[in-house]
Image (cartoon, grey):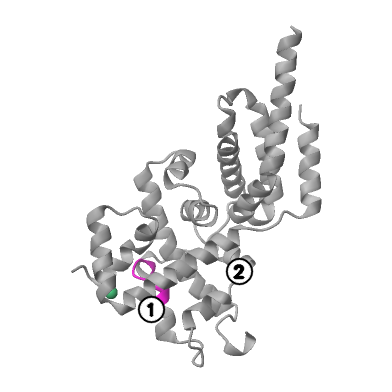
């Protein structure tokens, strides 16, 4: 049975090589989804993936398989924490246009690139903070598709919902994100010309 | 012609190439005639760039070390 054992050892070595190569990306995705819990979520993912090693049929799909496990580990952690996102005033968010809001409020009267100036006030941590305000069902597809380049159909498969549901959540998620960006900018002093 | 709010509602799908042929033409026709929606489009492009850029980031070396250690200890 030496041959079988070698195969198993090879499989484990392939797994370690795959995870090692994917660690930076997995961690970046987890950072966006669960913030400070990212390291724990990646640990969960490695353990879970290792337990399911026999499920891997196509080694070429290994990275996508890992990402899928990671997203679900992040969702479990998110739920366990039962974050309390800001209550959503959906009526207000539905018609919200951040572009128009910025033009109308004109926060930087001396600027000739108002909209770019607004966006430049947001560092990476600010973007993450805004995302963490959104309910999970909107945050997750938004993060996967627009921050990490997942395909919408890949996202649908990971979340086990129809493609139309992902598209609808992306649409609502974008509106909520724009609205929360504005509120966050107001609350955190990003609209003051003198601080930039 | 579609209205501004109809055009804006389709902008991200348009940028994702997720609209059908008819919608794509409708959006492009609107954009060719509406300056404000062109501004919305440029802003959407910048906002997407911000999101994509915010997804990148290095993994801290101590975190990487701990994760690699767990990986070696598995099994
Ligand atoms: Zn228009």
Judged from this view, the residue extending furthest toward the left is: B1
Q: Which chain carries label 2?
A: A
Q: Where is residue B55 in the image (x, y as percent from the top left)?
A: 59, 58
Is residue A69 depicted above or below A33 in this figure? above
Question: Which element type, helix, strand or loop, lies under badge 1?
Answer: helix
Instruction: Identify which residue is drawn at 56% across, 24% down.
Output: A57
Q: Where is residue A59 in the image (x, y as percent from the top left)?
A: 59, 29
- Asked if residue A64 is positioned above or below residue B58 in the image, the reply reads above
Left or right of A42? Residue B32 is left
In front of the other: A87 or B11:
B11
Q: Quadrant of residue A191?
A: bottom right
B56 in magenta = no
Q: In which quarter of the image is residue B74?
A: top right
State left or right for residue B51 relative to residue B4.
right
Residue range (magenta): A93-100
Q: Is residue B6 visible?
A: no
Say which quadrant the N terminus of chain A sits in: top right
Percent position of residue A109, x then y: 49, 92
Can residue B14 be seen in the rendering of this structure?
Answer: yes
Residue sitting farthest toward the front: B32
Residue at 55% over, 58% down: A84
| Placement of A148 over or under A21, stated as above or below | below
For the point 64% across and 54% down, the residue is: A31
Q: Spatial distance from mark 1 to mark 2, Cα to Cα?
A: 21 Å
Tell me if label 1 and label 2 are in contact, CB under 8 Å. no
What element does badge 2 sit on? helix
Where is residue A87? Give x, y as percent.
47, 64
Q: Which chain carries label 1?
A: A
Q: What residue is disc 1 on?
A: A100
Give the residue pinned by disc 2.
A126
Q: Which of marks 1 and 2 is nearer the N terminus?
A: 1
């Amino acid at each position: 049975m030496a041959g079988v054992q070698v195969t198993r050892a090879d499989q484990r070595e392939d797994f370690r090589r795959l995870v090692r190569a994917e660690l930076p990306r997995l961690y970046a995705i987890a950072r966006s989804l669960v913030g400070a819990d990212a390291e724990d979520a990646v640990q969960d993912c490695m353990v879970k993936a290792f337990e399911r090693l026999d499920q891997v049929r196509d080694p070429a799909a290994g990275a996508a398989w890992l990402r899928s496990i990671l997203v679900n580990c992040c969702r479990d952690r998110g739920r366990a924490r039962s974050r309390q996102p800001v209550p959503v005033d959906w009526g207000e968010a539905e018609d919200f246009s951040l572009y128009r809001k910025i033009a109308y409020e004109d926060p930087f009267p001396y600027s000739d690139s108002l909209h770019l100036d607004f966006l430049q006030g947001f560092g990476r941590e600010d973007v993450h903070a805004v995302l963490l305000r959104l309910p999970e069902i909107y945050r997750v597809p938004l993060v996967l598709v627009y921050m990490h380049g997942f395909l919408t159909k890949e996202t649908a498969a990971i979340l086990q919902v129809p493609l139309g549901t992902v598209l609808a959540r992306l649409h609502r998620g974008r509106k909520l994100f724009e609205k929360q960006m504005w509120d966050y900018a107001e609350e955190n002093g990003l609209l003051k010309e003198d601080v930039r | 012609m579609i209205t501004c709010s109809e055009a804006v509602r389709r902008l991200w799908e348009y940028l994702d190439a997720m609209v059908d042929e008819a919608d794509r033409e409708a959006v492009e026709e609107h954009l060719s005639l509406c300056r404000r929606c062109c501004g919305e489009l440029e802003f959407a492009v910048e906002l997407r760039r911000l999101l994509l850029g915010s997804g990148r980031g290095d993994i801290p070396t101590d975190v990487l070390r701990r994760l690699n250690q767990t990986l070696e200890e598995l099994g």
